[in-house]
Amino acid sequence: MSLRLATFNVENLMNRFDFSGFRNQLNQDRTLALFEIRSEAEYRALEQARAIAHSDDTRQLTALAIAATRADIICMQEVDNIEALKAFEYGYLFKMVGQGYRQKYTTSGNDSRGIDVALMMRDETAHGQPIEFMRMTSHAHLTFGELGLHTPELAALGQEPHERIFRRDCLEIDLKIGGKPLTLYLVHFKSMGSPRNGLDGRQATMPIRFAEARAVRHIIEQRFGRERAADKRWAVCGDMNDYRQRVVIDGEGPSDYRFEVHDEPVSCLDVLLEDGFCENVVERRPEMDRWTLYHTRGPQERHLCQLDYILLSRSLAEENAGAVPDIVRNGQPWRTPFPGGQDVDRFPRVGWDRPKASDHCPVAVTLDIV
């Protein structure tokens, strides 16, 4: 009995408009910056037209990327709300895969923009085994103080003990696959942001992601018992906004690009992976071929890295020792540099920078549930 499990940051699946760019140029789309706009009413009308036109192409590509995963269950990040998810599934994904993802779950988390983690799943696997929803538990309310995770490093960032740990949520969803239990933990950790206080964005925000990772491990160990947790059937899925390796890109252009793997001395992933607690199964792929996102701040800062994870409990990983995940990169924009031998056929209408399926790539793996 096999299950196809996927995770995908769908990048701002919203069902509302953001007009804050009229007063804050940092939030203004570059298209509107080309035009002289004389009033907020004019800005709102133009932003609505731009967002609608842009979203149609984007969501067709997002749906193509999801369809390419062939997933029975897909964990998602950056979903506005259940209404946005329903409209996307019915208006776009349904046209590609038919009556597939009838079951949808999300809940409001802590993100200031309102983007949440979510789950869509079929009623049964491709092999006809029923997929049953049992319960859903949000952990968005947990604070640093409650779990004893407040540190001087967090205090230096202005984080108080009473503040919530998760930037979004750790959404715990219990399922049964053909009658066998499976628990999923959906996460979307603190983003790296821009450099500050003499540190790059990753280092500056690292204490928050470490706290989030420790909180996820605490939740799992509390649920299953500290000594037994690794031997239970669970997976942590989502965008952790951190990496243990990156592929640094050098060179002047496509014909001159050079790719080199760099290991990172510290990552929040270490908290979850240490002691064999769980396994990042994407690391079963070659080092140069694990990336799910292209990051650039210009020619001096370019790399490919893995931000999107399916972490399997030790027991589930051992039961699926031969399972190697797929990474769907067909929705990446043409500006993304691909190492040699990794080029794929892009989906129709993918642009140089946009439209694209997302800035992230979906990750999917087939698991035997025994």
Image (cartoon, rainbow, N blue to C red):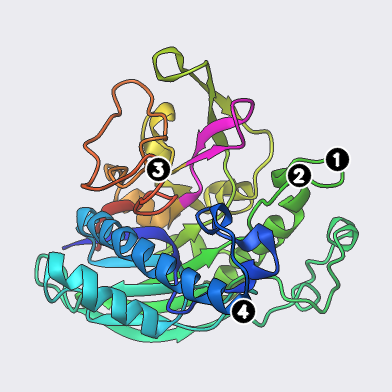
- On whether residue 301 falls in the magenta region, the answer is yes
Q: Residues within 10 Å of mark 2 (few under 14, many from 20)?
A: few
Q: Nearer the viewer, mark 2 or mark 4?
A: 2
Do the numbered discs 2 and 4 sit on residues whose CB atoms are within 8 Å?
Answer: no
Highlighted magenta segment, given as a residue range:
294-308
- Measure the alpha-carbon separation of dots 4 and 1: 31 Å
| Circle 1 SS class | loop
- Measure the alpha-carbon separation of dots 1 and 3: 32 Å
List the residue tagged with mark 4: 140
* Residue nearest the observer in this picture, 20 or 319: 20
* Residue nearest the observer in this picture, 84 or 232: 84
In the rendered image, the vertical position of residue 320 relative to residue 83, given as above or below: above
Name the N-terminal-most of marks 4 and 1.
4
- Measure the alpha-carbon separation of dots 4 and 3: 27 Å
Q: Residues within 10 Å of mark 4 (few under 14, many from 20)?
A: some
Q: Nearer the viewer, mark 3 or mark 2?
A: 2
- Measure the alpha-carbon separation of dots 2 and 4: 27 Å
Q: Amino acid at mark 2?
A: Pro
| Circle 3 SS class | helix
List the residue tagged with mark 2: 195
List the residue tagged with mark 1: 198
| Quarter containing the N terminus | bottom left
Do the numbered discs 2 and 1 sit on residues whose CB atoms are within 8 Å?
Answer: yes
Q: Amino acid at mark 3?
A: Val
- On whether residue 244 falls in the magenta region, the answer is no
List the residue tagged with mark 3: 282
| Circle 4 SS class | loop
Name the N-terminal-most of marks 3 and 2.
2
- Measure the alpha-carbon separation of dots 2 and 1: 7 Å
| Circle 2 SS class | loop
Q: Amino acid at mark 1?
A: Gly
